[in-house]
Image (spheres, rainbow, N blue to C red):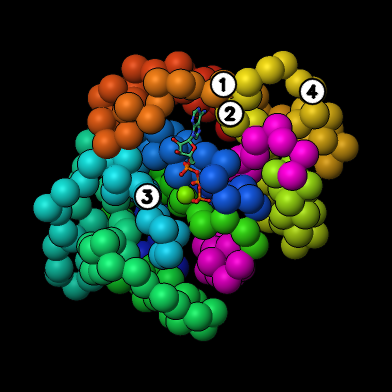
């Protein structure tokens, strides 16, 4: 724990992007947030915590890069972002891990990664309320949680459970982002109100987004990125 605290010491803010449900846009929002913050001159780290389905490297088009070693591991900079991911070690191979193994990999990653002076460390969480989230709460005391959901009733229900858990254990919750909005609906905003947390705004469904994956420059010019910038104004 002392080693982990030492590694995280020079990080100003840790924003953990979580969502309850899968496929709601956590990875795209986490990566776009990182790109926007980096473009604005901040020092940014991005930790891909989705060991079973890492995505950040694909969105950033990180190819042929590896961390460098020296009393720990220094993550490579991709488009100005210090990216840490298990993908450096497993490539495209599946990484089947059980509960305690997930914890071990995560603890090891936190203990070896040298982020250095960092304004924002963005954490892209896997779906659900599994081991990884509980470990973030246990090991990353600076973590502030940003919840992503779609306005679908199914996603909202699962998201509510996650929010209740986070509030119960008294970790900071920045608020809820409504993603992939197609029609105007108040569902997410009302739910946020009911849960007594901030509604941070919405990100519209962007039909051009798929063509911008693996092209960060293009991604930054999308309506999606504009919406993410609006969210940043309130976090
Ligand atoms: N606002 C949006 N407009 C259009 N497509 C979107 C939007 N947000 C996300 N997507 C698409 O939805 C899919 C899921 O996005 P993403 O992988 O970021 O979700 P996730 O929550 O990280 O998923 P997982 O739970 O599997 O990690 C992707 O194909 C992405 O391109
Ligand atoms: Mg993801």
Marks 4/1: CA–CA distance: 14 Å
Dividing the image into 4 quarters, which one contains the C terminus?
A: top right
Tell me the tag on residue 55: 3
Residue 99 percent coordinates (x, y)? 54, 79
How many C-alpha atoms fall within 10 Å of the one at disc 3: few (<14), some, or many (≥20)? Answer: many
Q: Tell whether 185 sits left or right of 10.
A: right
Give SS at disc 2: strand
Q: Reading the chain from its start, which is encountered first: label 3 or label 2? A: 3
Q: Mark 4 and 2 residues: CB-CB less than 8 Å, in contact?
A: no
**Rendered location of residue 195, percent (x, y):** 83, 42
- In the current view of this chain or complex, which residue is farthest to the right? 194
59 lies above or below 227: below
Cβ–Cβ under 8 Å for marks 2 and 1: yes
Queried on whether the Cβ of the residue with tag 3 lies below 8 angstroms from ligand 2, the answer reads yes
Cβ at disc 2 under 8 Å from ligand 1:
yes
Q: Which residue is mark 1?
A: 204
Q: Element type at marker 3?
A: loop
Residue 49, quarter of the rendered image: bottom left
Q: Is 138 situated above or below 151? A: below
Q: Is residue 39 visible?
A: no
Nearest-to-viewer mark from 4 and 2: 2
Q: Is residue 118 left or right of residue 163?
A: left
Query: Where is residue 190 shown, x and y percent of the image?
Result: 83, 29
Query: Which residue in the structure is indicated by mark 4?
Result: 186
User: Residue at label 2?
Assistant: 180
């Amino acid at each position: 724990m002392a080693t982990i605290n030492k590694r995280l010491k020079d990080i100003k803010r840790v924003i953990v992007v979580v969502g309850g449900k899968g496929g709601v846009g956590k990875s795209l929002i986490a990566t776009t947030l990182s790109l926007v913050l980096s473009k604005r001159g901040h020092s940014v780290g991005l930790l891909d915590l989705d060991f079973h389905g890492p995505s950040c490297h694909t969105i950033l088009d990180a190819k042929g890069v590896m961390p460098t070693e020296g009393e720990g591991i220094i993550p490579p900079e991709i488009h100005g972002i210090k990216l840490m991911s298990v993908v450096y070690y497993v490539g495209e191979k599946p990484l089947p891990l059980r509960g305690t193994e997930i914890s071990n990999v995560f603890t090891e990653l936190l203990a070896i990664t040298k982020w250095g002076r960092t304004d924002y460390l963005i954490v892209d969480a896997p779906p659900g309320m599994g081991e990884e989230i509980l470990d973030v709460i246990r090991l990353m005391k600076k973590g502030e949680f940003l919840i992503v959901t779609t306005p679908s009733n199914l996603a909202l229900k699962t998201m509510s459970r996650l929010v209740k858990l986070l509030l119960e254990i008294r970790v900071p919750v920045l608020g809820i982002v409504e993603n992939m909005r197609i029609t105007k609906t108040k569902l997410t905003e009302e739910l946020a109100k009911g849960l007594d947390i901030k509604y941070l705004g919405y990100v519209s469904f962007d039909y051009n987004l798929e063509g911008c994956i693996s092209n960060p420059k293009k991604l930054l010019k999308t309506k999606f990125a504009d919406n993410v910038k609006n969210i940043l104004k309130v976090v």
